[in-house]
Amino acid sequence: MRSAFRLLRVAGIDIKVHFTFPLVLLLGAFDWGSRHGAPGAAFGALLMMALFVCVVLHELGHSLVAQRFGIDVREIILLPIGGVALFGRMPRKPQQELLIAIAGPLVNVAIALLLGSYLGFRGDLPLDGSRLLELTQAGPSTQTLLQWLLAANVSLFVFNLLPAFPMDGGRILRAILAMFLGFSRGTRVAAGIGQMLALALGLFAIFNGQILLALVAAFVFMGAGQERAVEEARVLLSTLRLGDAYNKYALTLAPGDSVHRVIDYLLTSYQPDFAVVLGGRLLGVVTRDAVLQSLAAGQDDNYVTGIMKREVLHLDADLSLAQAREQMAEKGFPVASVYDGERFLGLINQDDINEALRIAAFLRLAQERKAVDVSVA
Ligand code: ZN
């Protein structure tokens, strides 16, 4: 993300702050400064910094688990509303998504437990809610800092577990649903639940005059819709099969055709390879190179069967394009035949695959821009 500056690098992940981030420090300074003067202002800024250290740890929780599953984590960006981790791709398996999503909130639980046991050991644990509320009245002190951070981590945990996108709870819900319904239906159901929850939250906020909560509800509502769109792009991408990319309108040859006919075809079409077919069965492939070699040798009166390659890589139409490309490269075939079971469909070459993958890459780019984790502080 442009307009963000790198602070440090942890486990190969850039941790950046957005240029609007200092706003939240100012807000904290203003809030505490109005009650406790200049020392209060410094304390307020310190509280916000400590809070965002917890947010970074939360995002690192997600990111380190994601890295374990081989997912590339580009950067973590701190915004005034929270942290965002940008992943190279989303996890494929529901179990992976579940573990990645739950890792963030678990970091907040761990921090809260640490702070709680330390404060408990010192007899400073605010056990009842009324003492928690008094925190804002308490003056700046180490005890206030730790108690405030404890309360903040508990609320980070609770809020992020709301079962609505883009919160972690939404991903956890989707992962669990996906185990039973599959990824696409799981996403649709989870997005629907999230939007209903956001609607209820929004109505509650409006009736109670809570503008900030209403904004959060709107944010959650849009997040759920976006997740659905991301899923649609992913389905499109993963359904890009060899059967969708081979040349369905290719010219074919019969065993009795002469090399002259291929020369005609080469001059009048962009097609570089030709299947020699008899009764729907593939006999071999004539490539442009083979034709040129035959021409150079002055043997253009031959039949195509004389110059065709009989050994052709056999690929199933169900293969994904990435798998097909891998197999062709591995076995050294620039051209392969595509089959639906026993039925010959047509030929595919590296250029066809690259072109289709280029289009897919654009789709993926649009998808990756949205593959983020948001944690609201
Ligand atoms: Zn999170």
Image (cartoon, rainbow, N blue to C red):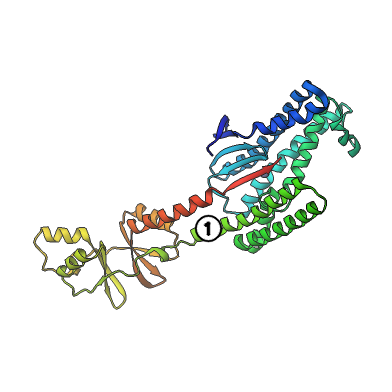
Taking 156 as reference, is 352 left or right? left
Image position of 255 with respect to 235: above or below: below
Residue 79, given in percent of the width and then of the height, sits at 64, 38
Task: Give the position of the C terminus as an image quadrant.
Answer: top right
Residue 308, given in percent of the width and then of the height, sits at 22, 65
Residue ID at (74%, 41%): 156
Looking at the image, which is closer to me, 140 or 168?
Answer: 140
Looking at the image, which is closer to me, 303 or 157?
Answer: 157
Residue 360, given in percent of the width and then of the height, sits at 45, 55
Image position of 366 with respect to 308: above or below: above
Amino acid tagged 1: Ala
Taking 369 as reference, is 242 left or right? left
Looking at the image, which is closer to me, 217 or 151?
Answer: 217
Task: Give the position of the N terminus as an image quadrant.
Answer: top right
Most extreme residue toward the bottom is 279
Q: Is residue 240 visible?
A: yes
Residue ID at (64%, 63%): 181
Most extreme residue toward the top is 39
What element does badge 1 sit on? Answer: helix
Taking 267 as reference, is 86 left or right? right
Ligand 1 quadrant assignment:
top right
Q: Which residue is mark 1?
A: 233
Taking 327 as reference, is 373 left or right? right
Mark 1 is surrounded, within 10 Å at the Cα level, by few (under 14), some (14 to 19) or many (20 or more) other residues, namely some
Most extreme residue toward the left is 298
Q: Quadrant of residue 310?
A: bottom left
Residue 285, given in percent of the width and then of the height, sits at 26, 65
Count of number-bearing discs: 1
Q: Is residue 141 visible?
A: no
Q: Quadrant of residue 228?
A: bottom right
Residue ID at (71%, 43%): 105
